[in-house]
Amino acid sequence: KNFSFFLLFSIGLGDSDCQELEIPQGDYAQWKILGEGQGKGEFRDRKLPKFFFKITGNYLPQGSLVESKDDFHFAPMEKMLGEAGFEQNLRVQTDGYRDPDGNSGSNLDIQFIRPVRIFSLGFAVTDLDVDDVIIRASLKGKQISKEVINGWFRGVFDSSEGDAHVPSWDKVNNAVVAERDGDGLLSEEKFQPPGSESPSAWFIPDVQFDKLSFEYRNRLPGPSSYHVYLAKVVKIPKEVLVKNLAVSKPAPKQESAFPIIYVIMALVGLLLFTVLFILPIMRSQSKRTRDKSLIREKKRGKNKYGGWS
């Protein structure tokens, strides 16, 4: 068939509009299979976190491997994350023949070695003509809410640079729903081949996370596959930054409270130190100075016979 793939990318800040950029060279993750259904990956840019991945569910180990033969293009996204065609990726294949009704699926979990900074990693899913992808994320074991993940959604598109084949976004389930699903909502409806290979959607996370999980649902009897790409990105559009600032306006106030508290605590500590230690020392020094002055005065007041003038 039919293949679908996830495209994940990290994002760097910039001042000029993303649309003005030429498509740059990308920094795509290098994947390595370590055993059946598991492996690791890293970027050339060591500032991006390394990751480990694991595939579970109804997948075919022999069809799940590292490839670099897929020609994937969508200009607005490639202006942000670099040329995507024929880059190294992870291919995962499901075995739909195990369930003639086409209810096969698999799970891909990507665990990063440290929390991913906001606007430093993003992802896209594609080739979702007869398949769904449910997206989940977490940070230190705590699930990120559906409302937050809805905020990551950037839109749907046709990766063949056209508009004929686009999936849907189901906000209730955080799912990219198959192009051929009439109402665009997650369901158990089954489809028959053939299908297109370009329905896509993309996302930019605006909160920290350290794990991404993708539940892939094949709604077509027979085997199906999807591909995962990770890459460094060169630019964030201004509207994304503006939207994030507007949504997270109260956050800086909460964060700024901590330095103020520390400053107040430091000032109180300095005051106590002054009262308890500095002032007593100064008073003691002042008393000794006065005593010495009195002694000198007395000495000057004596006459040569030892008496007082």
Image: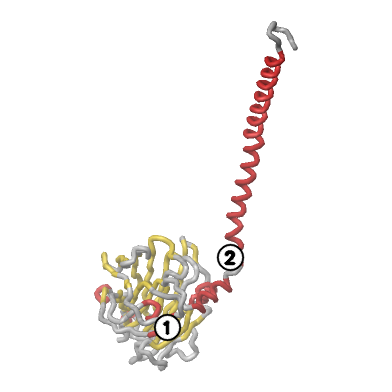
Nearest the eye: 228 or 128: 228
Provide the residue designation for mark 1. Answer: 20
For the N terminus, give its image quadrant: bottom left
Nearest the eye: 76 or 154: 76
Residue 200 drawn at (x, y percent): 40, 84
- The answer to whether any part of residue 188 appears in the image is no
Tell me if 172 is positioned left or right of 114 in this view.
right
Residue 229 drawn at (x, y percent): 34, 75
- The answer to whether any part of residue 284 appears in the image is yes
Nearest the eye: 80 or 37: 80
Tell me the CA gap for discs 1 and 2: 31 Å
Whichever of labels 1 and 2 marks the residue nearer the N terminus, that label is 1
Instruction: Check disc 2 and report its element: helix, strand or loop.
Output: helix
Tell me if 91 is positioned left or right of 168 in this view.
left
| Residue 142 marker | none
| Residue 251 marker | 2
Residue type at mark 1: give it.
Answer: Glu
Residue type at mark 2: give it.
Answer: Ala
Instruction: Check disc 1 and report its element: helix, strand or loop.
Output: helix
Residue found 26% across the figure and 76% down from its top: 67
For the C terminus, give its image quadrant: top right
Residue 172 drawn at (x, y percent): 53, 79
State how the image is colored: secondary structure
Residue found 27% across the figure and 67% down from its top: 32
Nearest the eye: 215 or 70: 70
- Disc 1: CA contacts within 10 A as few (<14), some (14-19) or many (>=20): few
Tell me if 50 is positioned left or right of 140 in this view.
left
Tell me the quarter of the picture where residue 260 sits.
Answer: bottom right
Q: Please, which residue is most extreme toward the front here? A: 304
Residue 129 drawn at (x, y percent): 39, 87
Q: Looking at the image, is mark 1 or mark 2 nearer the viewer?
A: 1
Q: Please, which residue is most extreme toward the right here? A: 309
